[in-house]
Image (cartoon, grey):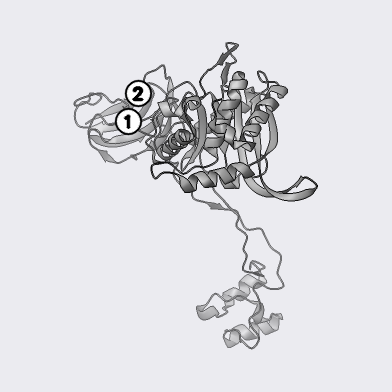
Amino acid sequence: MGVHTIKMPDVGEGITEAEIVEWNVAVGDQVREDDVLAAVMTDKATVEIPSPVEGKIVSIDGEIGAMTAVGAAIVTIEVEGAGDTPKKKPAKAAPVKKETMPEPEKAVEKEPVAEAPPVTPVAAPKPVRSIPATNGPPRPEGEKSLASPSVRKRAMDAGIELVYVRGSGPAGRILHEDLDTYIAGKAEPVTSSFQPNNTITETKVIGLRRKIAERLQDAKSRIPHITYVDEVDMTELEELRAHLNKTKREDQPKLTILPFIMRAMVKALRAHPKLSAHFEDEAGIVRQFGAAHIGMAVQTANGLMVAVVRNAEARDIWDIAAEAQRLANAARDGTITREELTGSTITLTSLGTIGGIVSTPVINSPEVAIVGVNKIAMRPVYQDGTFVPRKIMNLSSSFDHRIIDGWDAAEFIQHIRGSLETPATLFMEP
């Protein structure tokens, strides 16, 4: 018998370490050649590590969530023969489709990542109690406590009313042990059906959620955000949207407000092109784009993704709506591609009908602007000497204050507001 050591493979593209996100085997398991041992995640993609040999797992190095250097030993397998010589081929990382957090300039694959194993909740220790007046709710009037004569006599001698003692015997019968617990002050009073829950559950942050955390922390720590909020009267646009949805062709998608906002962003970017840009701060370069590649935040079961509606400036409302719908579906069912998750020049984010009144969206670095959409609500608006009901929505948008001045940010949002409040202009050339 011998042993074969499997090391963290070199997945290429200059990667020096990878995060272990899933173990498919345990010590003592028998594995066959090509069985998947583990899944690891890099900044580029998630890959599976197959076994190059048949044998028994004798050791595993590296916990889920651990960053492991390329070349470090991760699995040892007991094999027949001299060991450390694969029967057919060396272990290598086999790419699989799993989620990764998209980077603005780099390709990323998207597929489900294994979640960390559930952690058993640990109950907090019960506090030491003094002798309680009662250890349970009184029984309904007329209902006699179940107890033997000896228990009743002992309770009477101790001045204890059995109606307040909780019984642990059959049908709630009160036992001597229940009196012992009550007298020792260890009974836990029950005064209502609501009970404290002192459990604590720990979950390791790994995989896609870890990438999201790293990206957002980096953006907030490096970028001085300025957030600008203004309200938009959406009454006319909502009437137009309802009419278009009612009269649309069968082959046309249902219109949400997002295609209209994207179209308004395109028109505003024509007047304020510096907002469709990347700021490469380490190189000190602002890269301004003529195209409007609008990133669209999509919430999936495994975390937030940013799908990209490319060249929105060359699309009409219906085309934008169809592409946005296609990308959202692909992100949620795991078929979205690397190219569809990268290359945005400005981002639009929305919480839909739960969007609240105000939000402070985080810039999708290295972009310099993000437009946030809040929910539409009916509010009284004073017009022509009287209050009238109007559908009002707030836009909460953030900008990189190193590149975008507050005045420019406000003008950009006011341009979007003007287009949304006169929706006929959205169908005109920018």
Q: Identify the residue position indicated by label 2 in the image.
A: 9
Please state which amino acid type lies under the numbered disc 1.
Answer: Ile
Residue beneath disc 1: 49
The number of discs equals: 2
**What kind of residue is marked 2?**
Pro
Tell which of 422 and 127 is nearer to you: 422
> On screen, 3 above or below 30?
above
Q: Which residue is rendered at x = 48% and y = 23% of the image? A: 343
Instruction: Rate crowding at label 2 as few (under 14), some (14 to 19) or many (20 or more) other CA atoms within 10 Å.
Output: many
At a point 58% along the width and 21% down the height, the residue shown is: 270
Instruction: For the residues labelled 2 and 1, say whether their Cβ atoms are less than 8 Å apart.
Output: yes
| Camera-side residue of 169 and 194 | 194
Helix, strand or loop under label 2: loop
Q: Quadrant of residue 197?
A: bottom right
Left of 252 or right of it: where is 157?
A: right
Does any portion of residue 214 appear in the rendered image? yes
Q: Is residue 108 visible?
A: no
Q: Nearer the viewer, residue 347 or 222?
A: 347
Q: Quadrant location of residue 15?
A: top left
Q: CA distance from mark 2 to mark 1?
A: 8 Å
Q: At x 42% / y 24%, what residue is drawn?
A: 107
Vertical comparison of 124 with 79: above or below: below
Q: Height in image: 236 above or below 312?
A: below
Question: Which element carries disc 1, helix, strand or loop?
Answer: strand
Between 64 and 345, the residue placed more toward the observer is 345
Q: Position of residue 261 (x, y in %)?
A: 57, 35
Image coordinates for residue 424, horizontal then vertical, percent: 58, 35
Residue 359 x, y percent position in the rendering: 65, 38
Q: Residue 372 location in percent, x, y?
A: 61, 35
